[in-house]
């Protein structure tokens, strides 16, 4: 006999859905309910087993990746050794390896050119920043000689050059100086 739910309170309809209030009583006959719980238990075990399998697979894949990184690191060290051997004239290098060394030299040359370009751009940006005065009221950039902001009209404050006075001789030095330019004393 299949199980049936019997409500102790009448059914109500709310927005087209059937709602039950009160307690539901499950009637069953034979082993239908036990079979249901056995199936539910089997399902839970299979989900647990699948999750454990996924964890184990992930753990193994992680170890594989770790080992591959170790191999890559060892290959990198071999390459560095042969590159240093060629650069330091520590002995003959195979022609195949020599080709790779020449390729590395070319890449290193390009890298140094790009780094120099970055340094030039940084210096140009700093020079451009130094040729402007920033308005304290609105943040607009104004020419170095401007007395009033071109955007809001506020009076511009000229930045005072940062200086350090030498405790030994009283000479004025730039803030970044570590030693006095007149007497050579150490500045704080």
Image (cartoon, grey):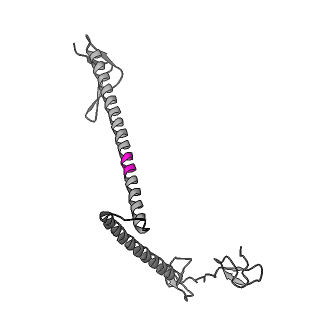
Highlighted range, magenta? 66-71
Which corner quadrant holds the N terminus?
top left
Location of residue 54 with respect to 3 vertically, above or below: below
* Image coords of residue 60 (percent x, y): 35, 39
Q: Residue at x 34, y 69 (%)?
A: 102
| Total marks in image | 0
**87 on left or right of 42:** right
* Image coords of residue 145 (percent x, y): 55, 89
Residue placed most toward the observer, 182 or 22: 182
Residue placed most toward the observer, 20 or 171: 171
Name the residue furthest bottom.
145
Q: Residue at x 61, y 81 (%)?
A: 159
Could you tell me what secondary structure mostly forms the magenta stretch?
Answer: helix
Name the residue furthest left.
1
67 in magenta: yes
Residue 91 lies in quadrant: bottom left
Residue placed most toward the observer, 96 or 125: 96
Name the residue furthest top.
30
Residue placed most toward the observer, 81 or 160: 81
Location of residue 154 with respect to 96 vertically, above or below: below
- Asked whether residue 42 appears in the rendered view, the answer is yes
Q: Residue at x 30, y 65 (%)?
A: 95
Which corner quadrant holds the C terminus?
bottom right
Location of residue 62 with respect to 1 vertically, above or below: below
- Asked whether residue 132 appears in the rendered view, the answer is no
* Image coords of residue 17 (percent x, y): 27, 32
* Image coords of residue 101 (percent x, y): 35, 67
Name the residue furthest right.
168
């Amino acid at each position: 006999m299949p199980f049936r739910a019997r409500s102790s309170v009448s059914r109500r309809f709310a927005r087209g859905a059937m709602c039950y209030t009160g307690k539901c009583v499950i009637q069953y006959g034979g082993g239908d309910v036990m079979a249901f719980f056995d199936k539910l238990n089997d399902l839970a075990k299979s989900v647990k087993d699948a999750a454990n399998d996924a964890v184990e697979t992930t753990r193994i894949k992680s170890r594989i990746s770790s080992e591959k990184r170790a191999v890559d690191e060892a290959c990198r060290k071999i390459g560095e050794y042969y590159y240093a051997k060629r650069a330091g004239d520590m002995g003959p290098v195979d022609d195949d390896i020599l080709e790779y060394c020449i390729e590395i030299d070319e890449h290193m040359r390009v890298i140094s050119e790009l780094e120099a370009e970055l340094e030039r751009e940084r210096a140009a940006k700093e020079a451009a920043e130094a040729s402007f005065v920033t308005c304290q009221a609105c943040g607009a950039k104004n020419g170095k000689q401007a007395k009033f902001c071109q955007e809001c009209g506020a009076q511009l404050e000229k930045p005072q050059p940062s200086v350090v006075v030498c405790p030994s001789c009283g000479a004025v030095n730039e803030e970044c100086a570590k030693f006095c330019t007149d007497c050579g004393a150490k500045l704080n």
